[in-house]
Structure formats: structure tokens, C-alpha cells
Amino acid sequence: MLNNDAIVALATPSGAGAIAIIRISGQEAITIGNSVFKSIKNKNLLNQKTHTLHLGHIVDDAKTLDEVLVSIFKGPNSYTGENTIEISCHGSTYIQQQIIQLLLRKGCRMADPGEFTLRAFLNGKLDLSQAEAVADLISSDNEASHQIAMQQMRGGFSNEIAKLREELLNFASLIELELDFAEEDVEFADRTQFHELLNRIEFVLKRLIDSFAVGNVIKNGIPVAIVGEPNVGKSTLLNALLNEERAIVSEIAGTTRDTIEDELVIGGIGFRFIDTAGIRETKDVVESIGIKKTFEKIEQAQVVLYLFDSLKFKVQSSEYIVEIEKIKNQFPLKPLVVVINKLDLLSNLEINTIQKELESLNIKLIFLSAKEKIGVDELKNQLLSFVNTGALRNNETIITNTRHYDSLLKALDEVTKVKYGLETNLSSDLMALDIREALYHFGMITGQVTNDELLGNIFANFCIGK
């Protein structure tokens, strides 16, 4: 699958900017770069040391295209493990196109999506989980997702898996050896130590699998649905959380006819706030569709904020408590926060009364004024408390990749079978089959076991220049 032909692509975002970087990788990368580069000091790029910078011009016959800086990285000490050069030119889209077209005429071809990182993997510069972390790092948009991607790219996850795989492989070798001496009825693998190893592997796999629930929401953002009757201040609260006028605020009930979504980073964690249409009985067809969408959004959300107008709540508390119980019973696994808005219109006595009335529901209760932005920080802290970030603080491995999650589940299933076989004195040949399957799924994570289709699916999601 590895091809040493020279590939070229724009490594910086497309469009005009101060500078652009054009990357070439392949056995002939430096030769091709040298054929279009004219150094201001008449240097030959082929004779220069690796990891050096050179000032000069890109020329197309007698025509000068741009003044550039050329970086040289000689294989295997480069990102891809191959000869690589990077041309830093001015960010004009015209200049970018002219240089790339010139390099294509000189023997390069356009890189496929993720082909630079694919070559890094095929040349042993990265394992597969580290390569996938590169894409996650590029797309990270908050501190938590950035931290997870960096930890995985440094090999934290793959090192943990590789260590378990190596230990299991050692025992597998002893089990296989026993098969060669089956007639002599000998045991090379210490069953007690093997049982301890399986327990340890099972524990680590379960911890990694459990971390996916946290990792997935951190990577994709935690969806929070803001629901409640029309005109209780949902849009005002959304604006207060985002600190901008994102949603239309009006005294007319039913202003929000559709869901409005926006994102906010709180404590390094991304939250996606969904301002939904108000829940009420209505004959308005358009508004009815919006209310139907509200329940769909609650279904999709990780957290539900149920917002109430303080003046209405103190008068209709019994009715509202029934509505809260409905949402709680319909979505029992979702964290529910009851938010009493317009705090500035309540007395301390009224606040205490509402607190006592809701005490039996065992829910989170917050009083705030979205308009005056009182209590908004308390709400943010409450949302943050729903996310288990202890693993992040302790720099533990967190799984965010669905492919890894699937392989871990399958590996755990095989390890459980091996453990059961060990406890029931299953024959070594049958146990060896389950061990091989477990090793296979471990190898699928790090790339020790791959196929062209798998690699194609993974790297198709990368940007072209990476």
C-alpha cells in the first residue's frame, strides 16, 4: 500500500492569508523542490542538512512566482518518515495555485485526504490510534477535547493497550507451546498468573469502555435542552449564557418557533445549548411542530433545564410540579435542573416556600434572573458538575473514538471467554482460539492488524494537507 511517489498539498487552510504552507513528501520531494527553487545564496537543496530553512524564490522557467522560505526534513526524521519539504509562501490564493500547479508539472501528484498521516503510520512514525488522534487534535475546539487528543497522540492509550497485548501474547505463546506437547500433558503457562493477568486486563478494558461515555460527550459537546412554557425567558437565558443576543426576545408568547442551538465552553468542556419552542397547548400549526421538536430535542439532550417564571410558579406551583414529574418520569436517566427565572421579583420568604415545595422531587433547583444575569454563573457550575472530569485532571486515558470503543468491547468479550475457559479447565486448543481473537481486537486499535478498507475509512475523514 505504501507508495513513495511525491505528493503535494496545501497544509494551511484554503483561502487568502498572510502566509500559506505547501507540503511535499516522497522519495523525490527534495529533488522536485530544488528544481523550482532558486536560493538567494545559490544553495542546492540536495546538499543541505535536514531541519534547515532556506530563503529564495520559486521560479517557473524565467518567471518568478514568489519569495519563499523552504524547510527541509530528510527521512526518516520527518513527520511522514520520508523526504519532506514545506514551502512557506505569501497567502494569495493565486500564488498558492500557481506553485501547486508548477509542482504537479514537475512530477508531484495531489495528496489524498490524510495521506501524509497515512504515510507516517505506514512508515512506523505513528501507530493507528495516534494517527486518529491527529484528526481529533485538529478538530478540538475546547480544552478538554484538546487534552484528550494530545494524550492519545503522545501514545498514552496505545501504550496501555500495547502493554496488555504483549503480556497476553506471552501467555498465548506458552498456551500454543503446550499444544505441541499435548500427548505429554505438560503445562508451560502458570494458570494462577494467567488468571491474575486476565483479571487485570478485564479491569483495564472495563475502565476504558466506561470512559467512552465521558469522552464522547467531551469530544462532541454536551447537548443541553432549555424547555418551559412560552415567554418564561428561555431565549433571554440562552443570551445570558452565551453573553450575546443570539435568540429573539419578545413579550409575545410563541416567539421561538424552532430550536436554536449555540455552543459555550465552560471550564474547558463544550456545551451545546438548545433553546426550544415553549411547551403549551396551541392551535397554531407551526408552533405545534416546534413543540413536537422540543420533545425530540429533550430525547437527544444529555441535560434538561426546565425554566419557570417565578411569578407564575408561586401561583401555579402544584400544576407545575405535576409537569416536572412528567418530564422526570419520561426521561428518568437525564439530569434535570429546575430553573426559577426572574429571581429579582421574589421575596426571601417566597424563595424558601418554593424550595420546600420542590424538596421531595430530589432535583437540582436554581434561582436566577436571566435578564439581570444573576445566578447564571451558579447554573454554569451546576452544568459542569454533571461532567466527570476527574479522569481529565488525573491524566487518565479517555476513549472518544467509536472504532476503539467497538474493538474494546469485542476484546473484553473474548477475554471473558478465556477467563471462563480457564476457570472451567477448558482444553488449551479451544482457549487458544479465544486468546487469538482478543489479540486480534487489540491489534485493530493500534494498527498491528489492518486492512485497506479500514485505513481508507479512517483517513478519508482527514483534511487533504494532513
Image (tube, helix red, strand yellow):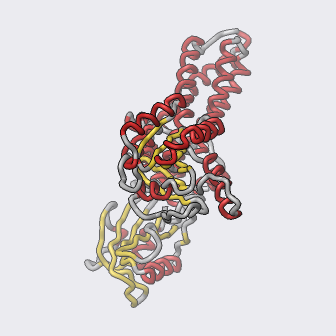
Please state which of residues 4 and 296 is positioned toward the viewer in this rendering: 296
Q: In which quarter of the image is residue 213?
A: top right
Left or right: where does residue 347 sit relative to residue 130? left
- Determine the residue positioned at 53% across, 50% down: 226
**Hey, which residue is sitting farthest top in the picture?**
185
Q: Is 284 displayed left or right of 346 in the figure?
A: right
Q: Is residue 148 toward the left or the right of residue 226 in the image?
A: left
For the point 73% across and 21% down, the residue is 430
Q: Is residue 365 above or below residue 231?
A: above
Q: Is residue 76 visible?
A: no
- Residue placed at 58% from the left, 15% from the top? 195
Indicate the position of residue 308 as horizontal and vertical percent values: 51, 47
Query: Which quadrant of the structure image shows residue 383?
Result: top left
Quarter of the image with the N terminus in it: bottom right
Q: Residue at x 43, y 62 (%)?
A: 83
Answer above or below: position of 125 versus 73.
above
Residue found farthest to the front: 315
Quarter holding residue 196: top right
Q: Nearer the viewer, residue 38 or 369?
A: 369
Q: Which residue lies furthest to the bottom in this view?
A: 62
Residue 156 % position (x, y): 44, 38
Q: In this view, does 100 lie above or below 303?
A: below
Residue nearer the viewer, 340 or 381: 340
Residue 391 rendering spot, x and y as whole percentages:
43, 35
Q: In this view, does 85 lie above or below 181?
A: below
Residue 237: tell me if it is visible.
yes
* Residue 246 image point, x, y percent: 46, 64
